[in-house]
Amino acid sequence: MSRYRKIFQLNSVTITVIYLVFAALWILFSDQLLLLFVKDVDTLTRYSTLKGLLFVFTTSLMLYFLVQFSNNNIKDAQEVVDKALDSVKIATWSINLKTNENSTSPHHYKLFGLKERPQKWDLNDFYRMVHPDDVSDVKKAFIEAIETRTPYLAEFRITWPDESIHWMKSQGTVHENEQGEATHITGVIEDITETKMLEQEYDREKELFERIFEQIPVMVDIYDPEINSIRVNEAFVNTLGWSNKEIQEIDLLGACYPDAKMREKAQQVMSEADGSWYKFEVQDKFGNMHIQEWSNIQLSDNSIIGIGLDVTERTEYQKQLKERNDFIETTLENLPIGVAVNSIDAGETTLINKRFSEIYGWPKETLTDVNSFFEHVYPDEKYRKNMIEMVTADLSSKNPERMNWEGVKITTKTGEKKIINAKNIPVYDQNLMISTVVDVTERVHAETRLAESEHNYRLLFQKSPQPMWIYNPENFRIIEVNNAAVKHYGYSRKEFYGMNLMDIRPEEDRDHDKIIIDRDKAKPLSETGEFRHLKKSGEIIHVRVSGASINYFGKSYRFILVNDITEQKKAEEMVLASIVEGENKERARIAQELHDGLGQYLAAANMNFDSVKSSIENLTEKKQNQFKTGLNLLKNAIAETGQISRNLMPRVVDDYGLALAIESLVDSYQNSSSISLDYFHNIEGLDLPREVQFNLYRIAQEGLSNAIKYADATKINVQLIKDELDLILTIDDNGIGFDVNDEDFKVGLGFQTIKTRTGALGGNFELDSKPNRGTFLNVVVPINNNTSNSDG
């Protein structure tokens, strides 16, 4: 039946052709058929009329059946189309733009989740089922298609009565009448929910792939040979430096493999894409070389995925590990102690270094395991049995502290007797026992000799007439003292044991002394230094101290020898005071002679020359110039003589006191140089002996003169300060400085003068300077009882 319908599928053209053929046949053969049966003309005319009626009836009947037949075919075809559309979830629709009526295919309602076809379905019904978030977009597309006469296309969601969401795709065409007015829009609507779900699944998988691709910690590249394009992940970019955009613009193989052979190998591995791993030297964007391993795989679409591992660090680590192992083996072989390694369970020896064989006196080939070791090293059977029992018990305890044996006697292959200290280190997780040995034969003999001399040493230490002690350099605690120290300082031996080095020093000296002691304690033998010590009675003494490192009962301590130089110090101060006093008296004498003798002669000469000054007009011009020059030189000599006299014995100290005298000195330097000088003092009302004032003035004069001449400074600070015990004069500058610790540094005459004058006053002189850090001069003079405060 279906084949028959296929053959006789009718349309307007087919029906017209059939009608024309039938009409033509009727016209050609109907009259001839009548002539065969009717001969009479009147009868023939009457039958011709009937023939015409029969033709009309027959053709009408034929056209009816043909149209009916065609309609049936169309209906069947429509049912087939509807079923086909229903099976693929597609429906047709047509909207009358004037009436807003919507004509749909029979199964249209199923796409909207309706159980039966509604009797009425217009555009508003459609909009009510569209998802609220999509309604405006659908309307906009619909209106735009009508206004622009362009195809209508929209993808949107609808909400079924069961509240499930479905995706739809609708497209249509706008139809116009003869006046160009839009009358209808027809189209199809398709349920694309499954497609959307597949797209979403594809998007999720694509996103997952992208995240894996970008975040995987190995380098990945994807090469598409059809478009000759390559894409790389973030690990590739971070490792080799090229971005995806840069890779498209360069010859990547040429850039990564500058060596032609390596590049050819990489090209071959990439074309084979057999999944095997190969190692390459790869150059990055910045010219750095990397050691990498690459594998390539070809996919079904002919694209090639490359996976790379940068093993530069691993290769370097392996290289370093090998070097370290070689170093360890070399080190073990050349260690000054013997080392051997054996397995714990089997006792087999796996390593013996050269020193181990030398100490025990047996070759490596002989000491193959624990049993052979005991048999050869301990030839005496009884002694060997005792050693085996002791070592076995200690090892079985698994207590590392017990695996340490000192003073063990062994016998070498030549019969030589030795004393060794041995220690075993178990490594249970690797089933290894590490044995170390040290030859202490000479040390034991030396200790024996040392023990014999210990008595003599202690006797010498205790009987020495000079104070001595031993202290711990880590915490300065006194460990031992001799009888002379107990007697001289007044502390009992028990009191000394509870004290440290800082306890026998004045509090103001402790910080300074600690720095010196910390500096010297690392020296085997420290230079002799002068310090102030404090006796138990509170008396301060001056001492000269020397120290040396000493091993005392196996510990590193410091040995100290003390020489009391208090009386010597006082004698030196008296000598210095006498020298300075004599110098001052000599200066005063010379100044007086210059003033009273030479000064008077020069003044008289000046007066005589001035008296004849008005009479020189009679002389020649040359003689007049010579006279004026001589007179000026004479005046300069008078001024210079006065300055020398004042410098030798400055009266400003006697006239105005120390504070104003130094202020005048600072002002004179300030006026004669571009250096900024600041002066501060707090000694108003302080009555000082003339000797102290004069010497401090000289010290300030010498210090400022040195700073002005040599420091190349822009600022100098001078301070004269008194506290409860001392008078302090400081001069510091920001000049070029010098290194006081330099071997080539020598104290000049100026600093030596300052030191001498300070010593004469019983004070302390300190000089500190560093290159480019300036110089600091500090003079501290005790006020003692020779001064008085006017405030009472």
Image (cartoon, rainbow, N blue to C red):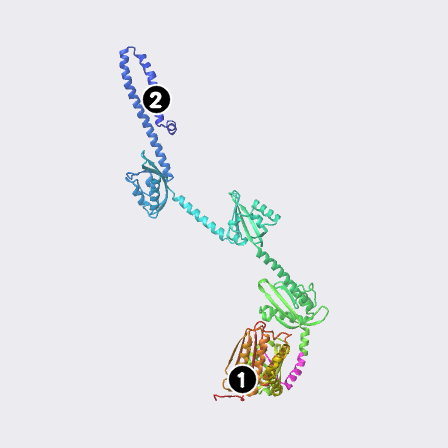
* Dot 2 alpha-carbon crowd within 10 angstroms: few under 14, some 14 to 19, many 20 or more: few
Disc 2/disc 1 C-alpha distance (Å): 153 Å
x 27%, y 16%: residue: 49
Residue 473 shows in this picture: no
**Res 107 → quadrant:** top left
Mark 1 secondary-structure assignment: helix
**Location of residue 657 in the rendering, given as x and y in whole percent from the top left corner:** 53, 85
Q: Amino acid at mark 2?
A: Leu
Tell me if residue 452 is in the magenta stretch. Answer: yes
In magenta, the rendered stretch is 450-472
- Front one among 163 and 524: 524
**Res 694 → quadrant:** bottom right
Q: Which residue is mark 1?
A: 658
- Front one among 215 and 515: 515
Q: Residue furthest right?
A: 414
Image height of 399 relative to 510, above or below: above
**Location of residue 374 in the rendering, given as x and y in whole percent from the top left corner:** 67, 68
Q: Earlier in the sequence, mark 2 or mark 1?
A: 2
Q: Which residue is mark 2?
A: 20
